[in-house]
Amino acid sequence: MTDHDTMLAVRNGDIEKMGMLFEKHHKHLYNFFRLVTRSREMSEDLVNDVFYRMLKYRHTYRPDGDFKPWMFAVARNARIEYLRSCDRKAESLDDIPEPVSSVPGADKVLEREDDNALVRKALAALPEDKRELLIMSRYNHMKYREIGEALGCSEGTVKVRVHRAVKDLADIFFSLTGDTHHGMH
Amino acid sequence: MECTNIKDRLTAYVLGDLDPQEKQLIDEHLTACDECRKEAAGIERVMTQMSDLPEEEPGAGMRLRFYSMLDDYRQEMNSSPVRVPLTERLSGMVESWWPSKPVFQFAIAAVFLIAGLWAGRMSVGGGNGNGELAEMRSEMSEMRQMVTIALMNRPSASERLRGVAMSRDVTDPDQQVLTELIRTLNTDSNVSVRLAAVDVARNYVDRDWVRVELVRSLGQQDSPLVQVLLIELLASIREQRASDAFKTLIENQDSIEPVKKRAQKALDTFI
């Protein structure tokens, strides 16, 4: 049964089927939030919130719709409202610290952090909306069309914005490495 | 190609978002140009890490929390009379008096049929009591429409099938019945129900809205049986607006041969 069919069944009253959607999607949704918000606690709250909202607003799920984009649209709204209500915008809660090399003491010895750690630092330095876009595209593997549906904009716009976000990410990454990665001509 | 032009397209190139011609142009440029190749490699280096982001297992508490929330929600749903949309309310109503045994279901459907026929015969007689009769007939029609809609939302496919069939007997269906019919056509999980919906929709192609929805539906169907039936219907009513949908089906790799042939045949008759 596709996610779409399952959600339609939930819409029609078979709310137990929401369990199937939970089992399938909760991990990726959790990690989406975690990578964007950098807070584990907030991410767990948000996942629960998203599933509650999908239940509560199940009547708004369209028969001609697509599940994944709808879920992400709900996810974005949930996050925006969460920030408003808890007034956490100022705090930028980071209970996930900046990545450092994992071997204790070795950070004194190692001169450079590895690429992965640097990319995560660069991601953290991006504005949230760009980070969110990159994660939806490259971690959650959403197609541009699906992201457009979730965000309410055209596929073309999404493509352009993702490209810009990648370019920004690369610029920050290379400024962190101290390499000059391209002649700026 | 100028480096300045290339640089703008390098991100798209690395992400694989370019069409083959542009990609090839850049491939060629990169074989010759060190600067651009270095920049592309840089973007590639970053994107490799993006595919390798750390993934965590959420705490066990999250699952517990979800199922407990679901429990609470279910209880709340069952106890309080929340404002429920029409389809669910009707479905609930039907559940309360629509018998579960097919024998009795048939009996009730027969009662409706007989009552409808009787009302029809009486009106032919004309003369006195016409006002009352008209009122009763319109009430009957409304009732039938409500039952039809409710049936189309039942969990059992055979009931939905019956609902679709009944909608054919509604003399002047209001928008709600037709909307429900189209929704069934587009989303019912059972192919037979969808096929029946196409059949019934045939009776309402005088309404432009229905024709538009049928074209739209063709674009969404994945069952070849339904696709073919829709193609035939759209061809028979000479719905020119379906041409694009036909073309898409023909060009789509996932369509099976008989569907493509049928679509081509229909397209040929349009020209």
Image (cartoon, rainbow, N blue to C red):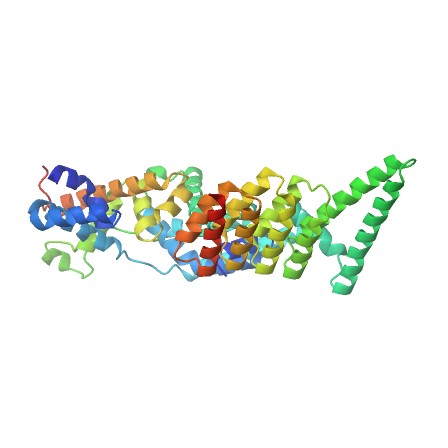
Quadrant holding the N terminus of chain B: top left
The outermost residue toward the right is B128
In this rendered view, identify the residue nearer to me: A73 or B124: B124
Question: Where in the figure is residue A15, as x and y percent of width and height?
Answer: 57, 56
**Visible in this render: residue B95?**
yes
Question: Where in the figure is residue B13, as x and y percent of width and height?
Answer: 21, 47
Which quadrant holds residue A162? top left
Which residue does the image show at 17% across and 54% down from the upper left? A115
Which residue does the image show at 52% across and 45% down from the upper left? B215
Q: How many discs appear?
A: 0
Relative vertical location of residue A78 with respect to residue B255 in this rendering, above or below: above
Q: Is residue B180 left or right of residue B105?
A: left
**Visible in this render: residue A44?**
no
Relative vertical location of residue B7 with respect to residue A135 in this rendering, above or below: above
Which quadrant holds residue A28? bottom left
Q: Is residue A124 left or right of residue B121?
A: left
Q: Is residue B170 left or right of residue A43?
A: right
Question: Where in the figure is residue A148, as x and y percent of width and height?
Answer: 38, 42
